């Protein structure tokens, strides 16, 4: 009976009126808990006559349709009326400069319940209320927080901040802009090539050579992934900067300039170190999925080990290599933190966008113009990946049993791989050693006296001072965002793999689009979209959490899609034949089978939320400061000791989280 009541729109209509009576209809400037009693009363919908009376009053129209005989005509009328109603609420709020408060959230939930009930009566998705409710919620999430912000970005680009047509051509004809674009493409392409080369070496060592050293190879292959990119940049600076020990050695013995790092070289080194793990995961998975039978056949036909690798393995790795190159290139284009620390006079698009907004210019038009250019480049790369790589078939695994073992690498290739891997491990050991050593030095390059003052300054000033507030706030945001990210990705994957519905391709494209949108562009678009009526989120923690969810949602989506393809749809059909609902099928059949993948997406989303910077740098305020923005502010102030100490602390926290997660989940083996 309770379950049936939740399907009835009247339940949600009554809940909306309860919210109207108890919660503010207008947004509160200082939040629900920071507002005074007078401010809270003034924000209530019933305190004075306003447009919200019409919004909520219209709710009583729809129960009248429920009294009519069930028909497709009445259901279609309800769908059309709800769409018009939402449009009226939106445009009237803009006309009256009305910022939505908490009660309006329940109003939209009630409208959504009416909309879902009408679609169920029309027979969409077999009339399943749960499926329709989830589909509607996911569509609102994707359209409202991925597509809508991008439209705000394009709007200011074509109209300018004054409402007139922006001076687009003047900006595009600026010679300095094309130099910045060339710099961005040059360094991101170089980073893509270097990262893929190192990732291939690491993947070959992990899958074809490592036995007892597998743990070491995994740690040093993935360690940079749990490190904020600019913390890697700080470590590089401690080694190769003007006061770095490597630079001093090179200067004394080879006459190398102390400024050689700042610019193209520094960005290349930092991004290669930070982004190689991403390429490594793609290539490791591709190598594990190669059928050993092909290599065995080549050897049986007289090919030696090198020829087998050269003419069999490498061609089959082409899609993974190209995919890794393009993804790393997009991530390099989007990151502004490493160029900010090590770029010097070498300007790239991401840093120019940052300075246009946080600098003295405060020029949103130029920032949006550069953001669209950066977005266009990223989408072009995304299009190449989808059309020239995604559609090709490189299947080598069949549904049969044991297929043998991979052919060992040739002696020369094995020596090369081991040598480069050893150099990678040694370099990273020095890098992270420098980070931790620098965190307990008085002043790197000047005074190497051992001290814990940096940690005392950060974490020894109580709960309301130093770095503790930003750390706790970061953990809170990540803990809230990670489950939403993993679950939304899981549900989207379920829809894309198990159902076909109108607009599915568009929703799928928009969801994956968020992965192609550079973080700086996403941050600018959020500022432009949610800094005005009717949705004003600037300065709140909600906008940061939403940014984390939409930015990381494709991670959970891709992980779940792969696993859904391995599950036989007959399992769902068997559950349905036993009268199980969709919710029961997901809860008791699908979710237990996909639990390892879902938990993996959960911890990955948590780590990325903890270490993100590009997408949220424009969204944080003094009251919503996060760990990465705190570190970046210390870098801006030249206080590298505190920045390095906080970065080292984040690395330890992330490694502990991953270690505890690994012990908790363990190696889950499922019978199929």
Image: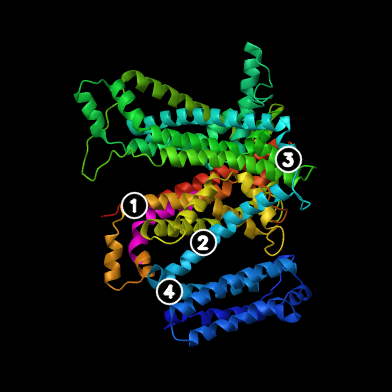
Q: Give the prevailing secondary structure in the magenta stretch.
A: helix
The span from disc 3 to disc 1 (Cα, nearest Å) is 44 Å
The image quadrant that residue 481 belongs to is bottom right
For label 2, the SS is helix
Q: Residue at x 27, y 72 (%)?
A: 578
Q: Nearer the viewer, residue 146 or 164?
A: 164
Q: Distance from label 1 to label 2 (Cα)?
A: 22 Å
Tag 4 or tag 2, which sits nearer the N-term? 4
Please give the label number shown on residue 139.
Answer: 2
Q: Which residue is mark 3?
A: 355
Write down the residue under mark 4: 122
- Residue 284, given in percent of the width and then of the height, sits at 39, 37
| Distance from Cα at disc 1 to Cα at disc 4 | 29 Å
Q: Quadrant of residue 92?
A: bottom right
| Residue drawn at (22%, 35%) of the image | 404
Residue 672 left/right relative to 180: left
N-terminal of the pair, mark 3 or mark 2, is 2
At a point 28% along the width and 22% down the height, the residue shown is 305
Q: The residue tagged with tag 4: helix, strand or loop?
A: helix
> Please, what secondary structure does the residue beneath circle 1 have?
helix
Label 1–label 2 contact, CB within 8 A: no
Q: Is residue 600 magenta?
A: yes
Q: Residues within 10 Å of mark 4 (few under 14, many from 20)?
A: some
Q: Earlier in the sequence, mark 3 or mark 4?
A: 4
Location of residue 409 in the rendering, given as x and y in whole percent from the top left corner? 31, 25
Is 578 left, or right, of 509 in this rendering? Answer: left
Which residues make up the magenta segment?
588-604
Q: Please state the total of marks drawn on the protein image.
A: 4
| Callout 2 crowding tier (Cα within 10 Å): few <14, some 14–19, many ≥20 | some
Looking at the image, do the residues carrying marks 3 and 4 touch, with CB atoms under 8 Å apart?
A: no
Q: Which residue is mark 1?
A: 565
């Amino acid at each position: 009976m309770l379950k049936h009541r939740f399907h009835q729109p009247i339940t949600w209509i009554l809940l909306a009126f309860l919210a109207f009576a108890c919660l503010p209809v207008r947004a509160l400037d200082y939040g629900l808990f920071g507002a005074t009693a007078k401010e809270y009363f003034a924000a209530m919908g019933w305190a004075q006559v306003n447009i919200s009376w019409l919004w909520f009053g219209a709710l009583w129209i729809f129960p009248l349709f429920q009294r009519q005989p069930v028909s497709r005509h009445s259901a279609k009328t309800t769908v059309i009326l709800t769409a018009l109603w939402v449009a009226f609420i939106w445009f009237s709020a803009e006309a009256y400069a009305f910022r939505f408060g908490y009660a309006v959230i329940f109003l939209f939930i009630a409208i959504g319940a009416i909309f879902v009930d009408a679609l169920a009566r029309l027979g969409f998705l077999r009339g399943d209320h749960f499926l329709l409710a989830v589909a509607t919620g996911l569509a609102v999430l994707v359209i409202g927080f991925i597509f809508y912000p991008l439209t705000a970005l394009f709007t200011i680009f074509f109209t300018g901040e004054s409402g007139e047509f922006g001076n687009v051509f003047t900006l595009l004809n600026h010679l300095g802009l094309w130099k910045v674009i060339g710099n961005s493409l040059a360094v991101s392409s170089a980073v893509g090539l270097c990262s893929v080369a190192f990732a291939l070496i690491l993947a070959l060592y992990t899958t074809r050579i490592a036995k007892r050293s597998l743990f070491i190879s995994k740690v040093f292959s993935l360690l940079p992934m749990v490190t904020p990119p600019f913390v890697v940049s700080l470590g590089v600076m401690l080694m190769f900067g003007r006061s770095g020990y490597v630079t001093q050695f090179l200067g004394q013995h080879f006459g190398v300039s102390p400024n050689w790092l700042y610019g193209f070289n520094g960005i290349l080194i930092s991004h290669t170190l930070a982004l190689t793990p991403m390429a490594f995961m793609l290539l490791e998975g591709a190598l594990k999925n190669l059928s050993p039978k092909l290599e065995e056949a080549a050897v049986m036909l007289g090919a030696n080990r090198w020829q087998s690798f050269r003419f069999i393995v490498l061609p089959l790795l082409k899609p993974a290599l190209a995919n890794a190159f393009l993804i790393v290139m997009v991530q390099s284009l989007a990151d502004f933190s490493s160029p900010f620390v090590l770029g010097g006079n070498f300007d790239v698009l991401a840093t120019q966008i940052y300075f246009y907004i946080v600098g003295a210019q405060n020029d949103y038009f130029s920032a949006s113009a550069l953001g669209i250019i950066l977005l266009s480049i990223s989408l072009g790369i995304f299009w190449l990946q989808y059309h020239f790589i995604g559609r090709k078939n490189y299947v080598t695994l069949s549904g049969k049993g044991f297929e043998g073992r991979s052919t060992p690498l040739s002696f020369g290739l094995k020596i090369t791989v081991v040598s480069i891997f050893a150099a990678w491990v040694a370099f990273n050991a020095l890098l992270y050693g420098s980070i931790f050593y620098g965190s307990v030095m008085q002043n790197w390059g000047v005074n190497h006296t051992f001290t814990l003052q940096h940690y005392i300054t950060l974490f020894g000033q109580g709960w309301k001072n130093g770095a503790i507030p930003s750390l706790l706030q970061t953990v809170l945001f990540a803990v809230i965002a990670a489950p939403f990210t993993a679950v939304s990705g899981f549900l989207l994957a379920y829809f894309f793999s198990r159902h076909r519905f109108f607009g599915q391709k568009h929703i799928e494209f928009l969801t994956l689009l968020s992965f192609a949108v550079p973080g700086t562009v996403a941050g600018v678009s959020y500022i432009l979209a949610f800094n005005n009526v009717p949705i004003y989120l600037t300065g709140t923690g909600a906008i940061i959490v939403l940014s984390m969810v939409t930015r990381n949602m494709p991670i959970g989506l891709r992980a779940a899609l792969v696993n859904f393809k391995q599950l036989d749809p007959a399992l769902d059909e068997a559950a349905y034949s036993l009268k199980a609902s969709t919710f029961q099928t997901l809860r008791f059949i699908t979710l237990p089978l996909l639990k390892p993948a879902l938990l993996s997406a959960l911890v990955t989303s948590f780590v990325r939320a903890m270490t993100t910077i590009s997408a949220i740098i424009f969204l944080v305020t003094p009251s919503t400061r996060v760990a990465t923005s705190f570190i970046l502010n210390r870098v801006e102030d030249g206080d590298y000791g505190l920045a390095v100490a906080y970065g080292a602390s984040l690395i330890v926290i992330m490694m502990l989280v991953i270690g505890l997660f690994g012990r908790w989940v363990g190696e889950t083996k499922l019978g199929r």
